């Protein structure tokens, strides 16, 4: 199996089913506009599956304008701190109250 075929298998058998089953999708924005192939594939799948997208941006990071546009919610908090995790959980819980299933 070629690398391309293996990549497609992983996406089609792993990522897509997981995203399809999810009510919403949460992602951590790449550092200062950086490009990460895994993040790109996941985000593209979220968009094509028309999933609500929650984007977490660590303080000091620059959120790409287009990523901001496709995100239903942007949470600015540090997931590495207890205070940040509490803020993230609270924001997600608040958003979930608004999501129609």
Image (cartoon, grey):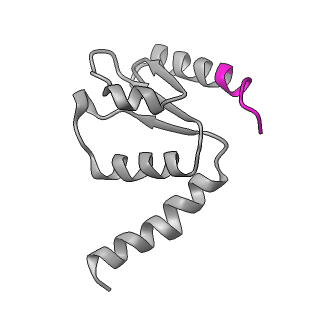
Q: Position of residue 48 (x, y in %)?
A: 52, 51
Kindly identify the residue that appears in the image at 42 percent across and 17 percent down: 76
Q: Is residue 94 left or right of residue 7?
A: right
Foreground: 66 or 39? 66
Relative image position of residue 67 (x, y in whole percent): 38, 32
Span of residues in magenta: 94-101
Instruction: Residue 70: give x, y in percent of width and height.
Output: 47, 33
Residue 5 at x, y percent in the picture: 35, 78
Instruction: Say whether residue 53 is magenta.
Output: no
The correct choice, above or below, for 12 with respect to 83 in the image is: below
Residue at 49% x, 68% y is 12
Where's the N terminus, which quadrant?
A: bottom left
Q: Which residue: 36% across, 46% down?
A: 39
Query: Which part of the image, by quadrant, shows the C terminus?
Result: top right
- Write down the quadrant of residue 94 in the picture: top right
The image quadrant of residue 61 is top left
Taking 63 as reference, is 13 left or right? Answer: right
Eyeballing the image, is 30 above or below 93? below
Front in this rendered view, residue 47 or 87: 47
Name of the residue lying farthest toward the bottom? 1
User: Residue at the location (30% across, 74% down)?
Assistant: 4
Q: Is residue 95 magenta?
A: yes
Most frequent secondary structure within the magenta stretch:
loop
Total marks shown come to: 0
Q: Is residue 101 above or below residue 77?
A: below
């Amino acid at each position: 199996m070629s690398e391309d075929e293996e990549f497609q298998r992983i996406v089609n058998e792993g990522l897509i089913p997981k995203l399809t089953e999810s009510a919403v999708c949460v992602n951590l924005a790449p550092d200062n506009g950086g490009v990460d192939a895994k993040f790109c594939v996941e985000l593209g799948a979220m968009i094509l599956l028309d999933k609500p997208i929650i984007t977490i941006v660590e303080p000091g990071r620059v959120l790409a304008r287009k990523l901001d546009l496709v995100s239903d919610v942007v949470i600015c908090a540090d997931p590495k701190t207890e205070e940040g995790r509490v803020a993230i959980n609270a924001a997600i819980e608040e958003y979930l109250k608004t999501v129609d299933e």
